[in-house]
Image (tube, rainbow, N blue to C red):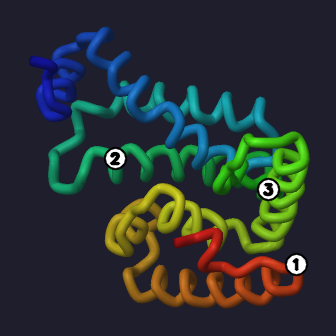
Amino acid sequence: MAPNESQIIEQVKQGNTEAFRIIVDRYRDAVYGLTLSMVANREEAEELAQDAFFKIFKSIKGFRSESKFSTWLYRITYNTCISHLRKSKHKLVEVQEYHGVQDFNSGYNNLIIEDNNNTIKTILAKLKPDDRVIIQLFYLEENSIKEIAEITGFSNANVKVKLHRSKQKLKSMMKENGFNLEQVFV
């Protein structure tokens, strides 16, 4: 029987690097996705994801299980990105790739899907960075309002307002581009 997450965390707290490898494997895509949504390029996102995992490993003994581990991990990742951006004064530009409903039956459909994904990425890039992260955490990562508030440091009410306003902006921009928001973020 495979160890559960709390057992793995306890093993990591004891210094077990193989147990930490399990955590990295489990959360690699989510951490990378969050960093990619906040910085200008893939290489920078990969570097920040590595930095975040290093910080997670160094500070895991401080994890007290008061919140979900994933929320704690996202918070460290988010703070790593914010710290980096403050130091480098970069603008948050690139958006995580959106992988929509895919139909691989024909090359034509693939071209349409690629064009739609590029359009969605362009639309998302027009949002403010915090709004883009909230959209990603809520719709793509399926975090709750409370979890997003813990990750970003915003109040629950502020997250709700930002989510609502971002959704309205997305609806407007997507309608202009022939999309329906409910088709993209269900």
Give whichever of discs 1 and 2 has the lower sequence position: 2
User: Which x, y percent locates residue 27?
Assistant: 43, 35
Residue in the image at 73% along x and 41% along y: 104
Kindly indicate the quadrant of the structure image that contains residue 147. bottom left
Kind of residue at badge 1:
Asn
Circle 2 packing at 10 Å, graded few (<14), some (14-19), many (20+), is: some
Instruction: Indicate the position of residue 133 as horizontal and vertical percent values.
Output: 60, 63
Residue furthest front in the image = 105
Query: Can you tell which mark lies on residue 70?
Result: 2
Mark 3 sits on what residue? 117
Instruction: Note whether 82 is above or below 182 in the view shown.
Output: above
In the rendered image, which residue does mark 1 sit on? 177
Q: Amino acid at mark 3?
A: Asn
Q: Earlier in the sequence, mark 3 or mark 1?
A: 3
Question: Is 60 situated above or below 108?
Answer: above
Could you tell me the amino acid type at mark 2? Answer: Ser
Which quarter of the rendered picture does the N terminus lie within? top left
The correct choice, above or below, for 158 with respect to 84 in the image is: below
Describe residue 87's horizontal placement relative to residue 49 as left or right. Answer: right
Horizontal relation, residue 163 to residue 71: left or right: right
Disc 3 from disc 1: Cα separation: 12 Å
Q: Earlier in the sequence, mark 2 or mark 3?
A: 2
Q: Nearer the viewer, mark 2 or mark 3?
A: 3
Q: Which mark is residue 40?
A: none
Secondary structure beneath disc 3? helix
SS category of the residue bearing label 1: loop
Horizontal side of 68 relative to 109 (left or right) equals left
